[in-house]
Amino acid sequence: MSDNMEEGNTSAPFRTNAYTSSPDIEEDYGPIEAYVKDDYDDDVSVEEIDDENVNILPSSAEVARKARSKLKLYSIIGSMCILVTVVAVMVPVGLTVLKTETKYTQPPTQAPSVQPSQAPTDLFFTDYVDAFAGVSDRTLINTPGTAQYRASRWIYNFDPVRRDISDSRLLQRYIAAVFYYSTSQGYGWLDCYPGDVACTSDSKEAWFSSHDECNWFGFTECDRDGHVTRFVILNNQNGEGKSYFGNNLHGTLPPEFGYLTTLTDLTIVMNKNLASTIPLSFSKLTSLRRLRLFSNSLEGPWNKGILQNMTDLMDLVLHGNNFNITLPYEIGDVKSLRSLSLAGNKFHGDIPKVYGELHRLETLELQNNELTGEIPPELFLPNLRVLSLENN
């Protein structure tokens, strides 16, 4: 037995459970399993063990170390999963709580926004309708296509000034918009229409621009509170030099213009497509001193009472229109008149004797009409300088 050990590999630090094979028996029992001692000889090499075709089992210390490593790894993975779960749950809850607190604890702003939203609610628009209904028929404001409807929508949705409903001059801007839409039918204005970058008439601005309406063409003068006192469309420049052919106003005089009660001078002339009566609402222009609407296409009927409150009216100039009616009697009640021109129409019938009570009258022009009858002696007034009655 000792001889065999000496002839074999005496350095292998293991014991075997296999019997020595007999030369007569040829069986393959597979590799030999070896139990490695914890205190094995350091001089034994791994190569020597591999040469014996054995499986090496780890030591108990190494098994314990690997188990601890796996346990540590599983602990880390588990902790991370728990952390991710907590974050996923708590972040939405935290945001919700933050929003709730902000909703109730955030202090209000010190001032409202400068501009209202670009798409206000129709409910808010009714407030504007209520305001405009003071000067316009509510039905017209709500009827698409009318001048009143278009003006109210422009004021509410597109006016760059965005004047507040409580502003005392909101109605003035609305009335101006109604005037434009009422008189811009057909081909529209020649000069200073909305968007006209070449507007140069009387050093004014185009209509519907971002400027105050007192800077628009036609608004010749406003008082220090911004209310119009003189409205004059006498000519247009149109970038080529002044021409006395009006501004191609096409349509009708809107009744809303009678609510510009600060007017002292209303002059709109030489617009052959301006076919209209004089609205009864003009009777509200109690401060008017000059009413000059000549060389248009104004016509009857004459609304009785138009002049009754114009106690300061000095000039009434209506020549060159299409009035085909008798001379209005109420003109004789305007005792302040100094100039009366009704020439170039189709007035017919007698000259009212009451005109002889206009003691301040200096000019009376009734020529080129269809008047009949005798000339009342009352017309020869002490201050009269011009009396024209030809071509009747």
Image: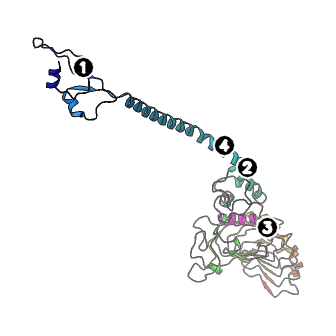
Q: Which amino acid lies under the numbered mark 1 shown in the image of this protein?
A: Thr
- The residue to which callout 4 is attached is 97
**Mark earlier in primary sequence (1, 2):** 1
From the image, tell me which residue sits under label 1: 16
- Do the residues bearing badges 3 and 4 touch, measured as CB atoms within 8 Å? no
Check the image and report above or below for 356 versus 46.
below
Q: Is residue 172 magenta?
A: yes
Identify the magenta region: 156-181
Three-letter amino acid code at the position of disc 4? Val
Of residues 249 and 207, the one nearer the viewer is: 207
Any mark on residue 282, and which? Answer: 3
Pointer 2 or 3: first along the chain: 2
Q: Tell me the mark number nearer the camera, choosing from 3 and 1.
A: 1
Is label 1 in a helix, a strand or a loop?
Answer: loop
Which mark lies nearer to you, 4 or 1?
1
**C-alpha gap between disc 2 and disc 3:** 56 Å
Residue 191, quarter of picture: bottom right
Q: Amino acid at mark 2?
A: Thr
Above or below, comparing residue 8 to residue 155 in the picture: above
Q: Measuring from the top left, give residue 200's x and y in whole percent.
A: 60, 79
